Amino acid sequence: MSKLLGLLDVLESKILEGKKVPLTEKVMVDEDEVMSIIDKIRSVLQSDDVIQNNIQIKPVNEFSSADNQASLDAEKNSEIEKAKKIKEGAQEYAQYILSNLQLIVTKMQNNLVKLEKNIEGGRKVIEERNSIEEDLKQEVLEKEILNDPI
């Protein structure tokens, strides 16, 4: 367990030593270093020591009474209910997130339509100005030709 805490301390120090991105709360870190630390954490978590330390074996009596069996069944059912509630909560949260994302996408689509209209309007203004400039240049050229004595 101390290995795990040590690796977490190393990871924390790498993040704290990372270069700050200006005007944000973000930090740049060396991806290879961080991934290496995360790999080490995974290997420690998967090692037999951590697994064995976290497994709690309940003593089972071969001659357990019906009361003990009933309490085990009740405990099992309770755990199943907790798992169902967690799953339902996760699904509700996922639906909430997806709904918000859909709303954001819809707003972005509306903004893109407005942006396309603005771009098209800008192009029309530029074309009109170019057309007016061409007409003025043509008029000036015609006047110069007509006023130029031969």
Image (cartoon, rainbow, N blue to C red):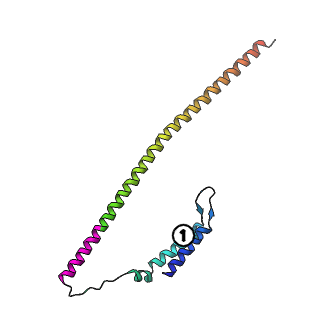
Residue drawn where x is 27% and y is 71% of the image:
78
Can you give x and y, in whole percent of width and height, for residue 108 in the image? 48, 44
Query: Which secondary structure type mostly characterizes the magenta part of the structure?
Result: helix
Quarter of the image for residue 19 reads bottom right
Residue drawn where x is 19% and y is 84% of the image:
65
Residue drawn where x is 42% and y is 50% of the image:
100
Q: Is residue 18 left or right of residue 59?
A: right
Q: Is residue 60 left or right of residue 131?
A: left
Position of 59 relative to 107 (above/below)? below
What residue type is disc 1 on? Met
Image quarter where the C terminus lies is top right
**In the image, which residues are magenta?**
63-81
Residue drawn where x is 51% and y is 77% of the image:
5
Can you give x and y, in whole percent of width and height, for residue 133 in the image? 67, 24
Residue 70: in magenta span: yes
Residue wearing tag 1 = 35
Can you give x and y, in whole percent of width and height, for residue 57 in the image? 33, 83
